[in-house]
Image (spheres, rainbow, N blue to C red):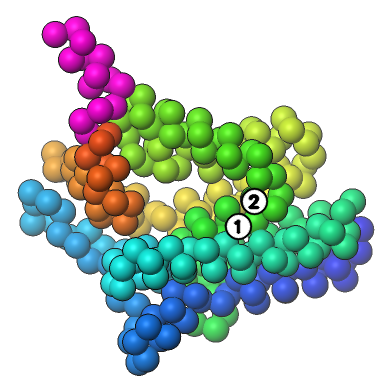
Amino acid sequence: MSYFWIAIAAIIGYLTGSISFARVIARLKSPGTIVKMIRQQVPGSETMFESDAISATAVRMQFGTGYGCLTAILDMVKVAIPTFIFMHIFPDQPYFLIAAAFGVVGHDLPLYHGFNGGRGESPIFGGLLIIDWLGVVITNLVGWLLGMICGNILVLRWSGLVLMIPWLWFRTHNLWYLAYIVFVNIMYWYAMRREIRQYFQLRDAGEEPTQEDIAQLWGMGSRLGNMLDQYNLLVLFRRIKR
């Protein structure tokens, strides 16, 4: 393995990851407009939920679902392309994993924008779809099932990312794969620390929002949250017992 190509993969991954498509879409949609900080009142509470992420979620809340989805897709593509190129040029070397990992670093800490970026969910899955698309499908299906069972939209959303750690290890038994998936998980959870802290503060204060409220606050669509409130398996089981 060449240190030169390690450096090239890291630099290319970081620089392409630093492209802030949330900002690009905002400027194309409305020249001179900036992506606003997410700031919403928690339903039934005077508490404000805040996030300074410059992300597809912020674009969705400011400009609509279509623009948010476009931003998420472009954020996936900007990591998927260098990952794909390095994988096919050097199929027996881990340069593609390095490019994918540093793409997430660039998204979270973009060089071109004062290191103020997003949280990294879309770029992580952009790389993973190239590295192991089957794992993405299976772990997210399991995550959806777990979320439906316990009636928690955050379990539904995040389980797939965590489950990719054991999946990649047992599928490859390769320390490079393991290091990659552990690294991007750490990057993601560290970037999300502010939002997660606010969620637990609400719980500790006895103001835990419903799943519908959480879905709205986290930009996941209130319908999905409402479905989990009304029809998760635990609720259905209680209804059957009655």
Q: x, y percentage for residue 116?
A: 45, 75
Callout 1 amino acid? Gly
What type of secondary structure mainly makes up the magenta span? helix
Residue located farthest toward the top when viewing the structure as drawn: 241
Q: Is residue 199 magenta?
A: no
The foreground one among 78 and 106 is 78
The quadrant in which the N terminus is found is bottom right
SS at circle 2: helix
| Location of residue 156 in the rendering, given as x and y in whole percent from the top left corner | 40, 37
Mark 1, residue position:
126
CB under 8 Å between callouts 2 and 1?
A: yes
Splitting the image into 4 quarters, where does residue 98 fall? bottom right
Which amino acid type is marked by label 2?
Leu
Give coordinates of residue 89: x percent, y percent. 88, 62
142 displayed left or right of 60: right
Report which residue position mark 2 lands on.
129
Report the magenta residues as a range: 229-242
Query: Residue at image x 43%, y 63%?
Result: 69
Residue 240 on the magenta span: yes
Q: Residue at x 45, y 42 (%)?
A: 158
Dot 1: within a 10 Å radius of its alpha carbon, few (fewer than 14), some, or many (20 or more) residues?
Answer: many
- Residue at the image position 46 percent from the left and 69 percent from the top: 71
Is 160 positioned to the left or the right of 182 in the image?
Answer: left
Q: How many marks?
A: 2
Residue 167 seen anywhere in this rendered image of the structure: yes
* Residue 231 appears left or right of 159: left
In the image, residue 163 sits, relative to residue 47, either above or below, namely above
In the picture, the disc for residue 169 is none
Residue 53 appears in the figure: no
What is the x, y in percent for residue 43?
12, 51
Q: Which quarter of the figure is the C terminus placed in?
A: top left
